[in-house]
Amino acid sequence: MKYYEEINNEKNIFASELKEPNENSFEFELTIGTVSEKEEDVIVNGINIGSARRINSDQNGNRFKIKFDNYISYSVIDERFDKLTQNEIFSGNRLRIYSDSNFLNYIKADMNATSDYPGNFKHYAFITLNHIINVASEKEPEIIKLK
């Protein structure tokens, strides 16, 4: 997968522009966040807990379009509600490819998708600072570097 390593090794990734441009296609953009040079005080409930640098999702970071021309299912989760599980098997960090996951188990239990129809499929997960995007698909995504 072109650009896999570049995305997979980043720490600060944001997702945006999630849409279905055509029937059974799904695409979104990933922006690599840039860390501000300026330190700012972080105030929580009126208490200064120290200084930090803001992570910006702006035009300064590299951007990628992720396209699935055909998919079985996808889900988008607010990253605050991700349930970390111990039994899932995957490779990757920010762009994960699962061989066993709760999402795959859900697909197999709740849908008419099997290795016979439509064929072998995988679970691709994109771990960003604001969303977890899960996609079950027979084909790997096309990744296009926008900037």
Image: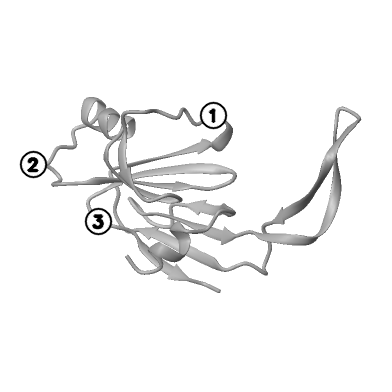
Look at mark 2 in the image and give the residue it sits on: 116
Callout 1 amino acid:
Phe
Q: In which quarter of the image is residue 3?
A: bottom left
Residue at the front extreme, as displayed? 50
Q: Distance between the residues labelled 3 and 2?
A: 15 Å
Q: In which quarter of the image is the C terminus?
A: bottom right
Disc number lying in front (1 or 2) = 1
> Cα distance, mark 1 to mark 2?
33 Å
In percent of width and height, residue 40 lies at: 85, 50
Question: Residue 5 sits in which quadrant?
Answer: bottom left
Which one is nearer the viewer's eye here, 91 or 102?
91
Few, some or many residues within 10 Å of mark 3 (<14, 14–19, 20+):
some
Q: What element carries label 2?
A: loop
Task: Tell which circle, 3 or 1, labels the residue nearer the N-terminal end.
Answer: 1
N-terminal of the pair, mark 1 or mark 2, is 1
> Marks 3 and 1: which is nearer the front?
1
**Residue 66 position by quadrant:** bottom left
Residue at position x 45%, y 30% from top? 84
In the structure shown, which secondary structural element does the residue marked by tag 1 occupy?
helix
Answer whether labels 3 and 2 touch (C-beta < 8 Å). Answer: no
Q: Earlier in the sequence, mark 3 or mark 2?
A: 2
Q: Position of residue 122 (x, y in %)?
A: 25, 46
**Residue with the mark numbered 3:** 139
Reply above or below: 3 against 92: below
Task: Find disc 1 in the rendering and name its residue.
Answer: 81
Image quadrant containing the N terminus: bottom left
Q: What residue type is labelled 3?
A: Lys
Q: Helix, strand or loop at disc 3?
A: loop
Check the image and report above or below for 47 versus 116: above
Residue positioned 43% across, 52% down in the render: 20
Please say which color scheme the image uses: one colour
